Image: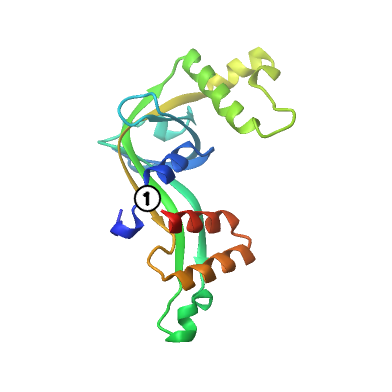
Amino acid sequence: MYIPAHFAAGPELLSELLAQPGAANLVTMTSQGLLATFLPLVYDPSVGEHGALHGHLARTNLQSSEPPIGESLVIIQGADAYISPSWYASKAEHGRVVPTWNYSTAHVYGRLAVHDDATWLGNHVRRLTDLHEARFERPWSVDDAPERYVSGQLRAIVGIELVITRIEAKAKLSQNRPGKDIEGVLAGLDAQGHHQVAADVSKARQE
């Protein structure tokens, strides 16, 4: 990933990207070429030196049975939005402005392991479910479903674990713009409803 020094993500943003509940793209190089799957992942910081990402694939997904060649890659995407040059105070001053895109992202590399035992899978889907159900008033639990049905569902998937070896993270959040331009960006983003990107820009400005 191309990361100019002023767009390098700090440790706080990196931790947020890893820990946020969401889905990401898993990319592996195999004997069949590049394979990719978009899937929900859970970060476990206790594994290895840099932690691990846990997820699951359908057993019939080719990516679950084709051994990866070398490192595997997970692409985690934070909030992103188009930035109009009309938001910059610089536009009125000299006009030398162009559109751009603000975003946060992490390329997470590691060794991919497949887990096929029911205990690992059961613990994983419960943790994943509890993570996403926590915001509901009456959260659903895996144990709300019949045990026989859950067992059948678990037999249809395999667990995957990316033990992280290195991370490249970038936060392109208008850090290269003067203060008045950033004020315009914040106002423009909020007006367009991109409140999370605006919050990220504001946080990057304070670092």
Give x and y (percent) for residue 13.
43, 46
Q: Quadrant of residue 112?
A: top left
x, y percent for residue 134: 64, 30
Camera-side residue: 122 or 91?
A: 91
Give the image location of residue 63, x and y in percent: 40, 34
Dividing the picture into quarters, in which one does residue 18 lie? top left
x%, y% of residue 60?
A: 48, 30
In the foreground, 187 or 128: 187
Q: Residue at x 37, y 50 (%)?
A: 9
Residue at 49% x, 78% y: name it.
89
Q: Residues within 10 Å of mark 1 (few under 14, many from 20)?
A: many
Could you tell me how many numbered marks the image carries? 1
Q: Is residue 78 above or below residue 93?
A: above
Of 137 and 67, nearer the camera is 137
Q: Quadrant of residue 160?
A: top left
Front one among 106 and 24: 106
Q: Is residue 118 above or below residue 57?
A: above
Image height check: is 155 above or below 184? above
Furthest residue in direction right, as rendered: 138
Q: Residue at x 29, y 57 (%)?
A: 5
| Vertical position of residue 136 compared to residue 180: above or below | above
Q: Which residue is mark 1?
A: 9
Here the colouring is: rainbow
The residue at 35%/57% (across/down) is 7
The local secondary structure at tag 1 comes to loop
Q: Tag 1: residue type? A: Ala
